[in-house]
Image (cartoon, rainbow, N blue to C red):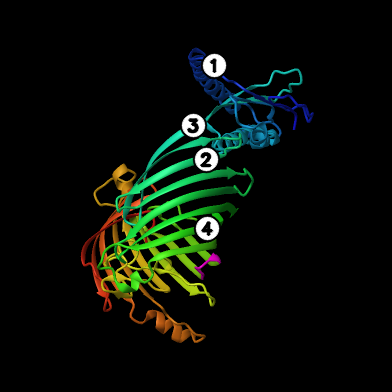
């Protein structure tokens, strides 16, 4: 591929192409300011030269049936300036593809792709490109020299974030060490506090492998405390996580997760039901989980087209006293209609199968149903078995919904307000219980549909930061069962994932 000059020059000749990785380490403020000024000047010159080159190509006469973009051009030399901690090998592998271009159009495309890959490595906070004609002793007529000017991320970093989940706002803060060993490794500590007394602390190390599958290995030590007032208990988890994530196909991500956690369940008050009290205490769970995510939607919050599919399988019982097999399914289909109206269908389902040994499970492992994130028109976990006002959950559930989203009337398309708000109409249905299924499919269908719940309504939905959604709906429960806790009227919900 050419001669590769890294911090310790090593040579390897191929086709006269050269790659030069230079380390620029300014030591004073004056030097940093001078480099910034030089960078601005070079960017302006690059823009002017690119414009002139484009004009010359437009004015050139096609020869031998070639279009202007097919004229010969090749990259003979690549510089990467600004490297400090980052290792040369991952940079070389990232930009190596630019040497394969053999015409002007492919050169521009390859350079843009290389710049994008450098930006995504996690090692740099800024990547600039400067293109010029190559004037070396081995220069050819169509030779090009490319310089990538990079600015590495600082070694020490801090972050402050806000997030939403489970109808709760959360604030998190922490610090991190970035690009520790020169290949985008990161170690971070983060503390999170929620509006509903949820707290967590995570210490996480992330190791990316920079391969075609975008494989990332993550290890974490954590402590998390949360309350479930609908069931009358508080949960404190302390554990370790090991996660291997990779892309098996475009828009398809898989995760293998090994989780070992020590859990402590306590009651919230004296009024907590005895059925919950008898599950209080300590438990040890070790589980292996596989997650498959397929997302082909054009937007995460308000998609207008595409489908998403998530399948989770968890086997608990590798150690400790908890053992079960748990499967969860989440599907969504979006169909565009005239006048920017979107029809959406969604399905949720879950099944927990206890293991036939001395293992058990607790209320925190069971499914809950009801609330503004799934079956609207009911209180949080307001559907299914209850005891003395406390939701007990169940081993099996399903929920389905049909939504219609429409832009706000009297607003111009493409504006910031019209993009963030949608009118929302819905019909929700579902069921939950400790259902016993057999080999009779008709009987199973009857069991799952018997005593199902149904609600409908309309309201307003708002995108929150492009990753979460806020809903204010007027809900009307139509079908409910004894023990359910309906919530007719206005209902507010905020979360990253809704049914």
Name the foreground residue: 179 vs 311. 179
Mark linked to residue 187: 2
Q: Where is residue 474 in the image (x, y as percent from the top left)?
A: 22, 62
Per the rendered image, the range of residues in magenta is 318-324
Question: Could you tell which of marks 1 and 2 lies nearer the N-terminus?
Answer: 1
Q: Where is residue 414 in the image (x, y as percent from the top left)?
A: 34, 44
Residue located beneath label 1 in the image: 27
Dot 3: few (<14), some (14–19), or many (≥20) neighbours within 10 Å?
few
Residue located beneath label 4 in the image: 259
Label 1 element class = loop
Cα distance between the residues tagged 2 and 4: 19 Å
Mark linked to residue 234: none
Name the foreground residue: 120 vs 61. 120
Residue at the image point whose x is 24% and y is 65% from the top: 475
Cα distance between the residues tagged 1 and 4: 45 Å
Cα distance between the residues tagged 3 and 1: 18 Å
Side (left or right) of 493 relative to 496: left
Is there CB contact under 8 Å for labels 3 and 1?
Answer: no
Residue at the image point whose x is 35% and y is 66% from the top: 402
Residue located beneath label 3 in the image: 156
Question: Could you tell which of marks 2 and 4 lies nearer the N-terminus?
Answer: 2
């Amino acid at each position: 591929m050419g001669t590769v000059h890294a911090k310790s020059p090593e040579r390897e000749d191929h086709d006269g192409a050269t790659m030069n990785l230079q380390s620029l380490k300014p030591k004073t403020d004056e030097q940093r300011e001078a480099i910034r000024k030089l960078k601005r000047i070079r960017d302006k010159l690059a823009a002017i030269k690119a414009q002139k080159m484009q004009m010359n190509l437009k004015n050139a006469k096609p020869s031998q049936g070639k279009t202007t973009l097919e004229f010969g051009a090749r990259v003979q030399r690549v510089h990467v300036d600004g490297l400090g901690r980052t290792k040369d090998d991952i940079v070389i592998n990232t930009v190596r593809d630019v040497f394969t271009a053999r015409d002007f159009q492919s050169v521009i495309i390859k350079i843009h792709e290389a710049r994008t890959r450098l930006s995504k490595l996690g090692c740099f906070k800024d990547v600039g490109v400067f293109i010029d004609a190559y004037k070396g002793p081995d220069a050819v007529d169509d030779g090009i020299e490319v310089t990538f000017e990079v600015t590495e991320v600082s070694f020490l970093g801090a972050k402050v974030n806000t997030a939403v989940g489970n109808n709760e706002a959360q604030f998190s803060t922490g610090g991190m060490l970035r690009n520790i060993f020169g290949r985008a490794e990161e170690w971070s500590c983060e503390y999170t506090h929620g509006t509903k007394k949820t707290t967590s602390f995570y210490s996480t190390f992330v190791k990316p492998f920079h391969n075609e599958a975008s494989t990332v290995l993550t290890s974490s030590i954590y402590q998390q405390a949360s309350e479930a007032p609908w069931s009358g208990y508080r949960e404190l988890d302390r554990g370790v996580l090991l996660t291997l994530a990779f892309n098996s196909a475009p828009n398809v991500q898989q995760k293998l997760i090994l989780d070992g956690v020590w859990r402590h369940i306590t009651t919230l008050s004296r009024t907590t039901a005895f059925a919950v009290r008898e599950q209080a205490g300590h438990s040890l769970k070790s589980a292996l989980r596989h997650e498959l995510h397929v997302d082909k939607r054009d937007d995460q919050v308000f998609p207008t087209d595409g489908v998403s599919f998530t399948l989770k399988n968890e086997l608990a019982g590798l150690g400790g006293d908890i053992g079960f097999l748990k499967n969860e399914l989440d599907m969504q289909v979006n169909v565009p209609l005239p006048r920017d109206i979107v029809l959406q269908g969604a399905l949720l389902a879950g099944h927990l199968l206890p293991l036939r040994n001395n293992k058990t499970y607790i209320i925190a492992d069971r499914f809950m149903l009801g609330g503004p994130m799934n079956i609207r028109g009911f209180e949080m976990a307001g559907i299914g078995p209850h005891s003395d006002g406390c939701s007990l959950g169940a081993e099996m559930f399903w929920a389905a919904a049909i939504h219609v989203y429409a832009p706000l009337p009297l607003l111009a398309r493409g504006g910031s307000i019209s993009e963030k708000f949608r009118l929302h109409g819905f019909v929700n249905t579902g069921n939950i219980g400790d259902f016993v299924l057999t080999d009779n499919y008709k009987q199973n269908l009857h069991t799952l549909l018997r005593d199902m719940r149904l609600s409908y309504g309309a309201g307003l939905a708002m995108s929150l930061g492009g990753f979460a959604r806020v809903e204010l709906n007027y809900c009307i429960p139509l079908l409910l069962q004894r023990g359910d806790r309906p919530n007719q009227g206005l209902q507010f919900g905020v979360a990253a994932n809704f049914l």
